[in-house]
Amino acid sequence: MDRELALEIVRVTEAAAVSSAQWLGRGKKIEADDAATTSMRSMFDSVHCRGTVVIGEGELDEAPMLYIGEEVGDGEGPEVDIAVDPLEGTNIVASGRANAVAVIAIGDRGTLLHAPDMYMEKIAVGPKAAGSVRLDDPIETTIDTIAKTSNKRVRDVTVIIQDRERHQQLIDRVRAKGARVKLFGDGDVGASIAAALPRTGIDLFLGTGGAPEGVISAAAVKALGGDMQARLVPSDAEEKERCREMGITDTSKVLQLSDLVKGDDAIFAATGVSSGELLDGVRFLGGDLAETDSIVMRAKTRTVRYIKAQHHLDYKPHLLAEE
Ligand code: VTB
């Protein structure tokens, strides 16, 4: 993959973020998602690659744009797999809450797991604990492992978990063990990456969330030198069949980081829509000015870039929401 791709795709996530952030707190999740998807799709035309969407807005019959199998890019350059979530957290934006991002992961053709749209059990950690934790270890063991690898007291180990009924037992056990718990409402891409980024002070992400989001996060975790493991959680026979159709016959298998994102290269870019663990959201500063914060990383070289950008919307009228 060309390294220029990393900088090119941040323009795409910025556009999606600026468009969807205009819908923050307006109670309109479809409009927020449409705005992100339309901007992301049109920006992709200028990206120098022959991309195929492997994780996107749905199947062809469900989504007019960025559907699975759609070819994107300028039709030249490297052949790549593309995983997108133009607005990771549509409910967040509609209700005006934290943690929404516009996000893209890119891998060489055939390297990103074609995860079906269902639940996935996930664990993510940063570089210090990479190689030492296992999805199937009891949570108490994992916390002890992290205390050791990061030279922290158990009481300082911080676990981020999505605030859902299905995680109550897990939350109780982390508390009983004496570690810290950080809960988030929605948006497990940002939360899982936060666990792999040393500066956040978050040591561990655990829980069950979307499988497509899991693959996108895995590209970032790989670029950060962290670790992620996962297991698909099909809820019925139909979902099991979908796994089989996508080439996953044994759904009980623990998927390693190298199963989620094969090979040693992947590019990841995210722009904050509403402020969260990973990034600040879009700020509208008056006049035609909007400011964005993004993160871009590449697994091959482990470079992580934070990009702050100012956008003059008078020059980008296509990013403006319709009144
Ligand atoms: C998950 C998570 C996402 O929505 O898909 C979640 O991966 C849905 O979970 O990040 P519930 O079924 O419990 O609501 C997000 O939080 C946001 O899209």
Image: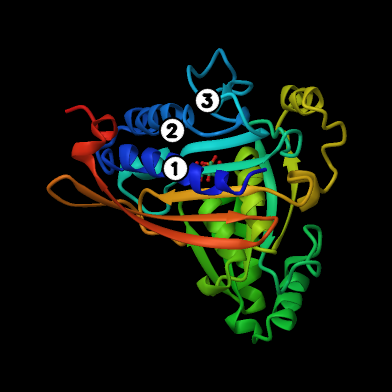
Q: Secondary structure at mark 3?
A: loop
26 shown above or below 171: above
Q: Is mark 2 within 8 Å of ligand 1?
A: no
Q: Nearer the viewer, residue 125 or 285?
A: 285
Q: Is mark 3 within 8 Å of ligand 1?
A: no
Residue 135 falls in which quadrant of the image? bottom right
Quarter containing the C terminus: top left
Give the image location of residue 5, x and y in percent: 56, 43
| Mark number displayed over residue 66 | 3
Give the image location of residue 172, x and y in percent: 61, 66
Do callouts 2 and 1 mark residues in contact (Cβ within 8 Å)?
Answer: yes
Q: Secondary structure at mark 1?
A: helix
Q: Mark 3 Cα within 10 Å, few/some/many (few <14, many 20+)?
A: many
Q: Is residue 159 left or right of residue 120?
A: left
The residue at the point 69 percent across, 56 percent down is 222
Q: Callout 1, which amino acid?
A: Thr
Residue highlighted by disc 1: 13
Q: Callout 3, which amino acid?
A: Leu
How far apart are labels 2 and 3 at the CA level? Answer: 9 Å
The residue at the point 54 percent across, 69 percent down is 181
How far apart are labels 3 and 1 at the CA level? Answer: 13 Å
Residue highlighted by disc 2: 40
Residue 173 falls in which quadrant of the image? bottom right
The residue at the point 61 percent across, 44 percent down is 216
| Mark number displayed over residue 115 | none
